[in-house]
Image (spheres, helix red, strand yellow):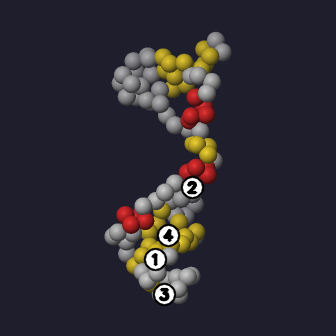
Amino acid sequence: MVITMVEFCPKCGLPMREVNEKGKRYLICPLCGLKKEISSNIEDKLVIKATEIDDRVIDEEAMFKNAPTIKVTCPRCNNEEAWYVTMQTRSGDEPPTRIYKCTKCGYTWREYA
């Protein structure tokens, strides 16, 4: 998985588009015409590895603050109730991931549909 970031024009705020001229790559604003050469190392800054995305920290307290409960068995303590949220953790054509937190022991686990 590769994600590239979009650079916005500092003058007018529109997304800049990439063009090639005489073997060099530039970002050009379609509105005001601001032109900026793309340096060879910019791609290293714009590419994010999938593992970096998956390792991001999620604030569990905020995530489960107003979450509903559901009857499900905790794999750690066998409690029959957990809070749950759904989140799109994979591509848009895949079903969302269910994330549970046990109301008794606080164990958190995921279920991929």
Q: Is residue 20 left or right of residue 104?
A: right
Label 3: state its secondary structure. loop
Q: Nearer the viewer, mark 2 or mark 4?
A: 2
Label 4 vs label 1, nearer the camera: 1
Q: Residue under circle 3?
A: 79
- The span from disc 4 to disc 3 (Cα, nearest Å) is 16 Å
Q: Position of residue 81 (x, y in %)?
A: 44, 84
Residue position for label 4: 99
> For the residues marked 3 and 1, what is the alpha-carbon distance in whole angstroms?
10 Å
Residue on which the image places disc 1: 106
Task: Looking at the image, tell me whether mark 2 or mark 3 is earlier in sequence order.
Answer: 2
**Which of the numbered marks, if any, corresponds to residue 61?**
none
User: In the orientation shown, which residue stands out farthest toward the top?
Assistant: 22
Q: Are marks 2 and 4 in contact (CB under 8 Å)?
A: no
Q: Position of residue 110 (x, y in %)?
A: 55, 70
Coordinates of residue 52 in the picture (x, y in percent): 58, 49
Disc 2 to disc 4, C-alpha distance: 14 Å
- Position of residue 32 relative to residue 102, above or below, is above
Task: State the CA–CA distance, disc 4 to disc 1.
Answer: 12 Å
Is label 3 in contact with label 1 (beta carbons under 8 Å)? Answer: no
Left or right, 58 with respect to 52, comes to left
What is the secondary structure assignment of the residue under circle 1? loop
Residue bearing mark 2: 54
Nearer the N terminus, badge 4 or badge 1?
4
Element type at mark 2: helix
